[in-house]
Amino acid sequence: MSAERPRVVIVDDHALLRAGVRAELEGSVEVVGEAGTVAEAIAMIAATEPDVVLLDVHMPDGGGLAVIAGMTAGGQPARVLALSVSDAPEDVIEIVRAGAAGYVTKTISAQELADAIRRVARGDVVLSQRLAGFVLDAFSGAPAEPSDPELDRLTPREQEILEQIARGYLYKEIAASLGISARTVETHVSGVLRKLHLTNRHQLARWAAQHRMVE
Amino acid sequence: MTREPSLQILAGALVVLAGVAAVLNGLGGPTLPLDGAASALAALTGALALGLSPAGLDDPLQEGWYAGVASALERPGLPAWAIRLIVLASAPLAGAGVAAYALAALVLALTAPPGAPVRIDPLRATATGFLGLAVVLAARAGGLLLGGAELPWAVLMIGSGLALFWSAAGALRDADASQALLDARAARTDLGLLLSLAGVVWVLSRAGLFDQAGGTIAATCAALAVLALVIGPRWLRTSRALRAESTDRARAQERSELADHLHDSVLQTLALIQRRAGDPLAVSALARRQERELREWLLGEPVASAAEGSLAGALHALVAEVEDLHGVRIELVIVGDAPLDARAGALLGAAREALLNAARHAPGAAVSLFTKVTDSQIEIFVHDRGPGFDPRAMAPERRGVRESIIRRVERHGGVAQVHSAPGQGCEVTLRVGRK
């Protein structure tokens, strides 16, 4: 895996957006393919074996979730960074729970997007400010049906880190203010994402339904 | 309905002749020698000739044996052959089975979905009448018939009258028919109606109903029944057409509302963006505002008013306002919510001041507003990644920060802090208890 110039496949049903993202990423990553449909994406990913798949959440024929399912079925190890215009919590939570290593909105700057891709390619996760807020909200208060206290609750340290992300701080700034290494911050964030994958699904689904909001 | 005009005229003439003969017969005038197997055979031959003519066979919609009624009515537990058997078995009962079959064929054709070709054609309907008559006469020749000698004529008259009526009414569905055709159809409608009414009246008078005390009531009921037969299917079809039309209208209205909205908002914004293409800040502010409006419109409710009187709703509105005024982009994250009381309002005012400061002193920098509401307190963090400054060296004339932010929060028992250093951005922390 080449962490400096990760190999990327862009999946989005809007050709204009693919072209725009490709132009923005020129030089910082290596775009090895583009796909406009779910079937095309699965075939393209199998053919090019990229490090990172930049995946649109909303597409015809099942959207990003279908692509992740197809990758899993095909044994593709590529990591997924979800990219969407939707900030609806249920979309964000669904795609991350399906296995995406991160979520960013389409209004992200080119620099931030390249950073996020590199971070995902390294094996880390990307938790946007908004996603951090969703996770904090979803895990706030006592779970309605506590099935596993380890998974249904955030540790104080995890909560602290998520809050700092939501406030707009970078990992290295968080690490400095908490007196820990940036690596440890990454580990905590990965842990949060793992909890998101494993925790009681009903609680999260209910939360997302209650918080259907655009911004 | 592409039929040979000559065949259609022939069928119509036969029906009229039959009706005239029936009327004459009923009035005691010259009677036709139609008793016996020979006349039945003649009628059957005529019916087959009409019904099975090439024009009658080229209808691709007919999947069944005759008019497709039995196949259409087929249900689990009620196979088509059983329906056919019932129709045939009840034919001698004054033509009941035949009449029911013809009626079912009419209803099926008329309740076909709009847009489907009309299934009734006068030729086939006439043939049905003849066939029914032939069955009845044959049964009578075999001594199986119930009812008087004139009944077959009455059945024929009513059946062909209805067939005529409905063939014309069905044809009226064609939107592109010329006025002359429509007039001819109207004449056919009237004639058919008249024929069937006359048939019914005749049956009733023969049965002696008009001589009894309740004769008028019976006649009225019969007339009403005929009217119901005549009007019912037409009413069904009209109401279905109306429904389809109102759906179309609703769709058209929705479309025009969408067009109006896109024109008023998106197209206007795009025009503005083209005119101000040289001003990146203005372009991004326009795009941002349009994006927010479109999202609210698509969701069907303005985000701010959805949470009227709540801190979260007020924060959404505040962020929108500052973004529009200063062309900055503010990342808003809210965890929890609280009613907009005096304390929350003070915090909101301070947050507004902090956002304006960030927009003023850190133009183009990323600005974040994070709000966390717990049971005991409300916290708001306004963070920008601008150039930063040394708070200790803050000029005393910068009243905004001291008065509008720190004092305002302190008056409500809260705490406000400003963290900043040159090159490290700035964060304003606002905190107030809820009790």
Image: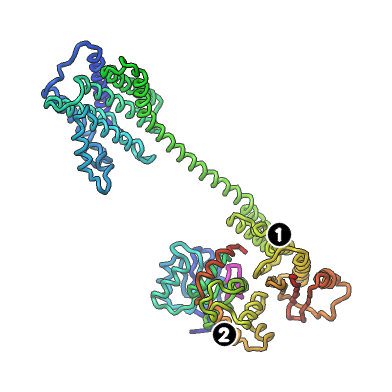
Q: Amino acid at mark 2?
A: Thr
- Report helix, strand or loop for mark 1: loop
Q: Amino acid at mark 1?
A: Gly
Q: Nearer the viewer, residue B273 or A204?
A: A204
Q: Nearer the viewer, residue B3 or A156?
A: A156
Above or below for B153 versus A115 = above
Disc 2 crowd, CA 10 A, few/some/many (<14, 14-19, 20+): some
In the image, A164: left or right of A67?
Answer: right
What mark, if any, has residue B212 been given in the picture? none
Residue A105 painted magenta: yes
Above or below for B3 versus B13 = below
- Residue B104 pos. (x, y %): 29, 35
- Residue B284 pos. (x, y %): 66, 63
Q: Which residues are magenta?
A: A104-114
- Report helix, strand or loop for mark 2: helix
Q: Is residue A118 visible?
A: no
Above or below for B194 versus B59 = above
The residue marked by circle 1 belongs to what chain?
A: B
- Residue B416 pos. (x, y %): 78, 75
Q: Nearer the viewer, residue B149 or B110?
A: B149
Q: Are marks 1 and 2 in contact (CB under 8 Å)?
A: no
Residue A13 painted magenta: no
Q: Splitting the image into 4 quarters, where does residue B383 fall?
A: bottom right
Q: Is residue B303 visible?
A: yes
The residue that disc 1 covers is B309
* Residue drawn at point x = 78 percent, y = 66 percent: B346
* Residue drawn at point x = 72 percent, y = 71 percent: B378
Q: Splitting the image into 4 quarters, where does residue B74 fall?
A: top left
Q: Work out which quarter of the rendered image holds the C terminus of chain B and state it.
A: bottom right
The residue that disc 2 covers is A187
In the image, A57: left or right of B80?
Answer: right
- Residue B193 pos. (x, y %): 34, 23
